[in-house]
Amino acid sequence: MTLPFALAIAFGLGAAPGDDPAPPRDTRSVSSTSNNKDTGGVKIRFKLGGATVTATLLDSRASRDFWSRLPLTLKMNDLFLREKYGHLPRPISEDGKRTRSYEIGDIAYWPPSSDLAVYYRHDGERIPEPGIIVLGRIDSGVETFAFSGSRTITIERVE
């Protein structure tokens, strides 16, 4: 492989027109109480009415697949007064660490229903099998998700 070709691939210049670029990689980590401390450093934004909340995605195939589908607009519903969830238009990769626990601020994928969830409160309950795949973590402002009822939310990339 020639050096210019290798550089083109490394910088994503070899992508076909119309292909979604891979999210940028970054080896920084986010300070949190979550067990998932390694992040890709890729930021996303949730728009909820007049509020905006940012989050950082983990570096996993599932997170990269989710990122590639942004922007998304989802109707987010409440479940157990602990999480807001919305059905993704189509499934994403399940290649990520599964867990049956969560932390406040986790953004997770529930594969059986292709649902995205944001956990804003902890009720002490465990997640049923097959568990969730944590995609990332809200940076701050997770209490914004504690609204009652349903709401349409836009999720987009932060470039």
Image: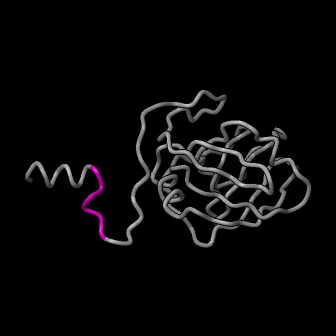
| Residue 35 placement, left or right of 13 | right
| Residue 115 placement, left or right of 159 | right
User: Which residue corresponds to the image point at 67% horizontal and 41% vertical from the top-left?
Assistant: 138
Q: Position of residue 80 (x, y in %)?
A: 87, 52
Q: Quadrant of residue 152?
A: bottom right
Q: Main secondary structure of the magenta part?
A: loop
Q: Nearer the viewer, residue 59 or 52?
A: 52
Tell me if residue 91 is in the magenta stretch.
no
> Which residues lie in the magenta part?
11-16
Q: Is residue 113 visible?
A: no
Q: Colour scheme used in the picture?
A: one colour
Q: Position of residue 132 (x, y in %)?
A: 64, 51
41 w.r.t. 128: above or below? above
| Residue 88 placement, left or right of 50 | left
92 w.r.t. 41: above or below? below
Q: Nearer the viewer, residue 33 or 51?
A: 51
User: Which residue corresponds to the image point at 84% horizontal and 41% vertical from the top-left?
Assistant: 123
Q: Nearer the viewer, residue 12 or 35?
A: 12
Q: Position of residue 44 (x, y in %)?
A: 59, 49
User: Which residue corresponds to the image point at 42% horizontal and 38% vertical from the top-left?
Assistant: 26
Q: Nearer the viewer, residue 37 or 124?
A: 37
Q: Position of residue 105 (x, y in %)?
A: 71, 40
* Residue at the farthest front position: 50
* Residue at the farthest left position: 2
Q: Is residue 29 visible?
A: yes
127 w.r.t. 78: above or below? above
So how many labels did they put on this image? 0
User: Which residue corresponds to the image point at 42% horizontal and 64% vertical from the top-left?
Assistant: 20
